[in-house]
Image (cartoon, grey):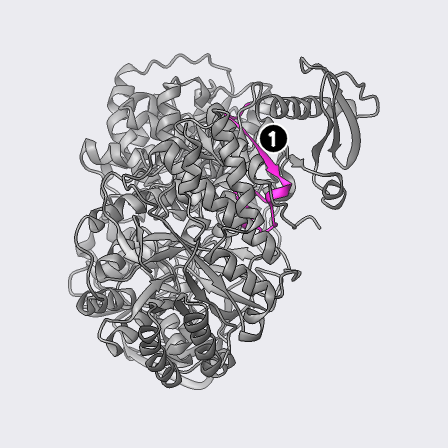
Amino acid sequence: MSDIMIPVKFKKLLYWILEEYKKESTIFGIHKDKFYKKLDSSSFTIFGEKCETAMGPAAGPHTQQTPNIVASYLTGCRFFELKTVQIMDTLDIEKPCIEATDEGYNTEWSTELTVPQAYDEYVKGWFLLHMLNKMFGLSKADERSFVFNMSVGYDLVGIKKPKINDFIEGLKDASEHSDFLECKAVLKEAITAGDIPGITDPEFVETISPNISNSITLSTMHGCPPEDQELICKYLMSEKKLHTFLKMNPTLHGYEYVKNAFAKLGYDYITLKEESFTHDMQWEPAVKMLDVLIPFAKQHGVEFGAKLSNTLAVLNDKGMLPTDEMYMSGRALFPLTINLAKKLSHKYNGELSISYAGGANFFNAKQLYDIGIRPITIATDVLKPGGYTKFTQMANLLDESMAKPAPAKIDLAKLDTLALDSMEGTTFRMETKSQDPMYIDKKLGMLDCFVAPCTEGCPIDQDVPEYTRLIGEKRYLEAFELIISKNPLPHITGYICDHKCMLKCVRNDYEEPVLIRELKRVAAEKGFNNYMEKMKLDVTPVGIKVAVIGAGPAGLSSAYFLARQGFDVTIFDKTDKAGGTVTHTIPGFRIPDWAIENDIELIKRMGVKFEFNADENIDISELKSKGYKYINLAIGAWKSRTLPLEGDTSKVYGAIKFLQDWVKNPNAVDLGKNVAVVGGGNSAMDSARAAKKTAGVENVYIIYRRTIKQMPADREELDHAIKDGVIFKELINPVSYKDGILKCQVMKLGEADSSGRKRPVPIEGKFVEMQISSVLSAIGELVDYDILKANGIEVDDKGNIKIDEFKETNVENVFIAGDAYRGPSTVVESIADGQALTNGILAKEGISLERINPEDYEFDYDTRINEIRYKKGVINPTIEVLTTDDEIFAETKRCLECNFICNKCVEVCPNRANISIKVPGFENENQILHLDGLCNECGNCETFCPYDGAPYKDKFTLFWNDEDMKVNGNDGFLMISEGNNTEFKVRVNGKIYVVNFDNTGKLLSCISDYEIAQKAEFDSLMNIIWWTYKNHNFLFV
């Protein structure tokens, strides 16, 4: 089967490591700059052994194969909880089996290898870790300072059977085991041959202990009775003489506790199974069991503790993975696990040893250690971008604590603080991480796939990584020029853009997105004056007049782009100022007037003319008669929807009209003491905040028929409203307003509607009443369709306007853009419409659009490569306000520059099955090659790939045997023979070819039946095959 991993022989792995490091300065994709080196001799003792960092990979995907263990060690892990083995070792696991977008989910149990194969992987890892430590001097300790902890399950009958018994005994003492002896002989031979840098004495091999593990973590099935767990632990401690951790479940809290915790933290979308709690071990029996096992361990001279915690079984009602049930881990598990640790620690006065797993990461690892909880094992966090290299930063962080004396027992006061913060603070609340999809609407290709998701997520394709680097190098003028090549409103969008780019930022998978909008504002503020001083309008007139109706963002942007191409553009606006809704309805606390004025001045300098206080009754025929060949209707959407309320509506105002009046003169608005704003969008937030700042107003309520979570307003605008003291009233819908009383129908959430949000349903007979002085209706704005219809524009009964891809209407040379076409939309969407409209006119006139190519900017190549490598895997939270040059510089350095180097699929693969290879002749810095033999199709690379695709399926694949190539349908290649005529079996677009290269890389065979239109791709793939064979031969097993 294509998801079955192929164990690699020790000798092959050994020389793979040596050759890869020699050629690439990497080992299994981990660059030497990310290797962790212990700079002092500090350690902690566990099971009578020294461990020089208190963390490592949890039993799971990162300890399943030897390369995974090696990658973990190189990046600072020293405690290895080996993946669980069990008697049923040929289970067919449905794939994909991992989903870790935010909190993690998996459907795997124990290792997917057979027990003997798993044993072999752990022995190979044992030898390689000793070798790597010696090669690179990773530790200052004279003795081994890492610990292997075996993990077994799931019942006593299975554990006692020969297969598992041999596994346990073989790790306790491997001295006579054939796998151990083979590794020993191979390593000694390599040292004797002088193949291993830094190791010259073959006797080094004799110092490698055959006692691989003297400890175990017991994992049992959910629902395993406490008496059975007690018997297994007693067996392991008394008969096997193993130090034992017992993995315990978060279900010990009870169903109501967990349900309420999830509701409080915002994870109410996670569907719990109540029977998982009632069938699982309960608190009182668990305590009774521990009361027996703790003294039992002392009696038998071994250590005993709790492993906190197991995953949490939940229903798979989102269809994320192919099974009915899945197991939750990561961020959402931390509050449950740390509070379970608190509960147990208080019960046993801090003297029960705790091995931790359950949402551990950079932000809490040091706190956990300082509390006295250790070791700390991690899985979900390193399944995300950055991958194994996140361990390096955590290891260095823990060094600060490990240099001090370790706590003798758990510090209950510190634990109480951390547990409380996990429930009451904001860190673990669901909404602190964007839940918006980070995918882009493009298919993943086999080649040259690097992309900046921020740019792709931006409606105007702003070159975010490039302008960010320019700002970081203080090249503000160039950054400004690059921005305005696609965006004529850099100041405005620097303040009020809804920044969809930030929702796509890969930094979301680390901590929080780069402050892209704020950096744009920096470029505008620091580059504008210099640009205006140096600006020379060197445009050849094309002799074509364009009329733009409306001076809002859509009108301004189309005028700007057309003027830059030499068109004679005039903007007509019914008001006395340019800017549209930005000028007239957005309050000054969101954007200052000077920012708007700067952008208007930029557009004027492009030669755009303005006519204000124009007749709002548009006449297209008249404009054409005046010589305007093209007309852009950018008239906006100014009419507030009428709120259907029974009773007196004299104190019910449209939000747009209220904001217009408030912007003109906040002191002229009289709203009374208590104001209700109906709606949940950005206009509602602006109205509520403006009302709150109005004289005489004491209370402002936002009334919404759904929940806060479902509000369409940008999260930051909602947060601003909360900060300003606005009160949110969820699940109520106004029905009448009489004598200052607003009566609202109480709602509940029903089935999801077409938008994916749950539909609000009235609760019959249930109402609430509120004392309200004024009501502001912010339930949407409407376009004046009558004006459009009067000019012959086709509008259907639903308000849909017939246009083409360039926004041209059914009336020739008449275009429509912005809110007038879309309905209420964003500034940047309106700018995008202006771009599209311009492209349509240019196409009609046969004029090519002139725009800056971001690749033309020169950056120091080595500096850029080194900086990106450093940033990968490093947690670096943002500074919320960018004021000083140092703060600005620091923020620019958070950008990962994904379009230059992405490699997310390489980083997140626990099996090292996606690799980056630098092949000449391609657009991207490197190409992605998939190794079928290391892949178990867990699906993690698909989760984090920005495209609509799955690297483990879509990337060119190296196969290690013919059978796997037949089973796996990927395009890829298999080496058949090598020498002067090296032969490969190749599949491209489903077709099989046999190709031959001579020893210079010249393709000997003729590809006669390959479609000529695809020959360039075929030649590129042949280039990859030969380059891989010639320069990465260690990949061929």
Q: Residue at x 66, y 60 (%)?
A: 90
Left or right of 245, for residue 421: left
Q: Residue 941 lies in magenta, yes or no?
A: yes
Residue 909 visible: no
**Camera-nearest residue between 109 and 902:** 109
Q: Secondary structure at mark 1?
A: loop
Residue 381, placed above or below residue 740: above
In the rendered image, the residue lying farthest to the right is 1009
Q: Would you name the residue on which mark 1 appears?
A: 447
Location of the C terminus by quadrant is top right
Tag count in the figure?
Answer: 1
Whether 813 is drawn above or below 687: the answer is above
Which region shows up in magenta?
923-949
Give the residue type at disc 1: Leu
Q: Residues within 10 Å of mark 1 (few under 14, many from 20)?
A: many
Asked whether residue 282 appears in the rendered view, the answer is yes
Q: Is residue 676 left or right of residue 947?
A: left
Front residue of 605/453: it is 453
Whole-percent x and y of residue 941?
54, 46
Instruction: Please tell me in which quadrant of the rendered image residue 929 appears.
Output: top right
**Viewer-closest of 201 and 664:** 201
Q: Position of residue 144 (x, y in %)?
A: 34, 46
Q: Position of residue 106 (x, y in %)?
A: 53, 60
Q: Residue at x 53, y 74 (%)?
A: 156
**Magenta stretch contains residue 514:** no
Measured as percent of width and height from the top left, residue 738 is found at 33, 79
